[in-house]
Amino acid sequence: MHDGSGLIAVQNLTKQFGSVTAVQNLSFTVSPGSVTGFLGPNGAGKTTTLRMLLGLVKPTSGTATINGRPFHQLGRPGRVVGAVLEAQGFHPNRTARNHLRVYASAIGVPDAQADQVLGLVGLSTAAGRNVGGFSLGMKQRMAVATALLGDPQVLVLDEPANGLDPEGIAWLRNFLQSFARMGRTVLISSHLLAEVEQTVDQVVIVSRGQTMYYGPLEHLRQQQQRRVFVQPSDVGALATALREAGVQALEQLPDGRLAVSGVDAKQVADTALRAGVSVYGIQEEQADLEQIFFRLTSGQFAGHAPAPYQQQQGGWA
Ligand SMILES: Nc1ncnc2c1ncn2[C@@H]1O[C@H](COP(=O)(O)OP(=O)(O)O)[C@@H](O)[C@H]1O
Ligand SMILES: [Mg+2]
């Protein structure tokens, strides 16, 4: 039924608009069976990248391929990739079903497919209504339905959660995850980490057209220097024991706890045990992903940035 595996490969992709470098030497791959978040602040180059992938913008250099081919060599692209782009227009006086039939005939799939995809996005009961009267959330579902007409292996969505209410975001999350679990490929962009955090299996974080991180969110979380908060029976004795064990970064918090960096909770508790200090409470700090995301991408505005990610997956150089 499907043509090829559904692999998206972006390799050394660069796009120059005059003096503006919208995308700079970007590389990442998206495998079938997963949802990949394409994250970065406004102006980071997400839309330009997705448009190059969809054959709407010509790369200055590098390649963006689906199933190993650039978009214009896909043969029947509507069957391979479906896309939800920003600011999609719908004819306001056309019913949902008729809108979809127009697109269905354009890509050569049967009319019946219109009702099929309306069912997939939960709009069956609205099939006969004019799209002009749809809420923003319903319009976003319509955009997804349009992208699904060709029963594509790959789904590319540019900021699909923009303006969606929490219910719409939850629907989109469930939908994209089950779509990926069927072995298909999903690439979804957003300027808000929180919007897609629970949806994605891995992320590509871009800033100023460059990759800042590429890998699972969980690795990003783990790489952060986390602190251990411990409530000991004797702060002074534990601090001394930790220093003797080589721990440099210690801070006493106003509530009487110690904040310890560079070790995990087990090491702190073991040290306390050896020093004869009781531990009344201990917890590891939760890394705040939003902060990490902000730190990785804030250089776009501040004029100085962390070094872009270079080689190994799941880290940055
Ligand atoms: N057609 C264009 N002509 C000139 N500059 C453009 C064009 N499209 C995008 N840009 C510029 O490229 C940069 C990246 O834009 P874009 O890809 O839309 O980022 P994002 O989708 O991440 O917000 C921005 O500086 C934007 O102004
Ligand atoms: Mg954009």
Image: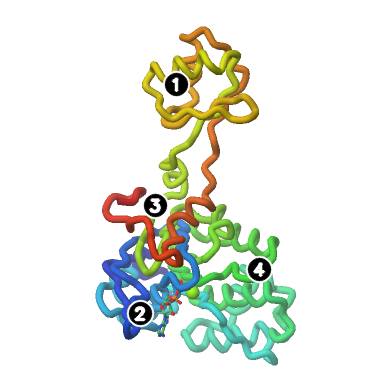
Q: Which mark is residue 215?
A: 3
Q: Are marks 2 and 1 in contact (CB under 8 Å)?
A: no
SS class, disc 2: strand
In this view, 151 is above or below 233: below
Look at the image and tell me whether residue 184 can be seen.
no
Circle 4: residue type: Leu
Toward the top, the furthest residue is 276
Residue corresponding to mark 2? 20
Q: Which sits earlier in the primary sequence, circle 2 or circle 4?
A: 2
Q: Quadrant of ligand 1?
A: bottom left
The crowd level at tag 1 (other Cα within 10 Å; few <14, some 14-19, many 20+) is some
- Where does the image place residue 199, in percent across and percent down from the top left? 55, 56
Residue 304 image offset from top left, x and y in percent: 38, 61
Spatial CA span between label 1 and label 4: 45 Å
Residue depicted at x 60% and y 57%: 174
Question: Mark 1 vs mark 4: which is more N-terminal?
Answer: 4
Q: Nearer the viewer, residue 97 or 9?
A: 9
Apparent side of residue 229 relative to residue 45 in the rendered image (left or right): right
Disc 4 and disc 3 in contact, CB within 8 angstroms: no
Tell me: is circle 2 under 8 Å from ligand 1.
yes
Q: CA–CA distance between discs 2 and 1?
A: 50 Å
Q: CA distance from mark 3 to mark 2?
A: 27 Å
Specify the label residue 100 is tagged with.
none
| Image mark for residue 267 | 1
For the residues labelled 2 and 4, the Cα–Cα distance comes to 31 Å
Residue beneath disc 4: 164
Tell me whether the residue at label 2 lies in contact with that at label 4, contact meaning CB atoms closer than 8 angstroms. no
Decide which of 77, 264 is in the foreground and name it: 264
Q: Residue at x 69, y 61 (%)?
A: 166
Residue appearing at x 46%, y 9% in the figure: 274
